Amino acid sequence: MIFSRKNTSAKSPDLASIGKLYDNHAPWLLAVCLRYTGKREDAEDVLHDGFMKIIRSIGSFHEKQTGSLEAWMRRIMVNTALNYIRDHKKKKMVTEIDPVLEQMQDQDDNDDPGGCDLSQDQLLSLICELPDGYRTVFNLFVMEDYSHKEIAKLLEISENTSKSQLSKARNFLRKRLLEYQNITNYAKAESNR
C-alpha cells in the first residue's frame, strides 16, 4: 500500500504519498466518474471532490474492515458522483412511470448486436450518451453490482422504476451497437469492392 499508517493522519499527510496515490489511481477513477456524469468537465469536478474526501479520510481506511483500497476509493467516487448529479441536475434524475404503462413500454428488442468489437473508449462513449437516469441505474446495476432494491433506496425511486431504467438503458445501448455494427459492416463491404 502506498500509505503507511504514520503517513495517514489527517493533520500531516505525506504529500509525496498523496501525489503517488493520485497518479496511480486518478485515471481509472476518472473513468468511473465519467460513466456517471457523462461529461469530462463534470467528471473532473467529481474526481477532485472525491479525492479530497479520500485524502481527508485515508486515516480511517482499514483494509480488513472496508476491503481493498481500490474498492474503498471506488465507493467514495461513486457516492461523490451520485451526490454531484443530485446537486447539479435541475430536473429529477429518474422519473417515476405508471407501472402499467411501464410494462407495456418495456418490451426488449430481440435484435442481437453480437459481434460488435468496441474499444473500451468507444464503450465508455456509448455509456456517456445514455440519458442521466438510464446511465445512473445502468452503472449502479451493471458496473457496481447493486440490486434493484439497493438502487431504489439509494436514488429514492421504486424498484420497478429502477428495472425500467435499466431495460431502457440496455435497449438504447443495443440500438447504438446495432447502428455501429451496420456502419462497420457497410464499411467492410465497401472496402471489399
Image (cartoon, helix red, strand yellow):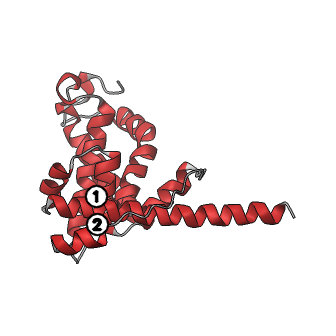
Q: How many marks?
A: 2
Find residue 189 and report its horizontal and vertical position in percent.
78, 63
Q: Is residue 189 above or below residue 119?
A: below
Query: Are there few (<14), some (14-19), or many (20+) residues within 10 Å of tag 2?
Result: many
In whole angstroms, how far apart are the C-alphas of marks 1 and 2?
Answer: 6 Å
Tell whether label 2 touches label 1 (CB within 8 Å): yes
Query: Are there few (<14), some (14-19), or many (20+) residues within 10 Å of tag 1?
Result: many
Q: Quadrant of the C terminus?
A: bottom right
Q: Nearer the viewer, residue 92 or 158?
A: 158
Find residue 115 and report its horizontal and vertical position in percent.
60, 50
Residue placed furthest toward the bottom: 91
What residue is pinned by disc 1?
Answer: 137
Q: Is residue 134 left or right of residue 171?
A: left
What's the amino acid at mark 2?
Answer: Gly
Q: Does any portion of residue 93 appear in the rendered image?
A: no
What residue is pinned by disc 2?
Answer: 133
What's the amino acid at mark 1?
Answer: Val
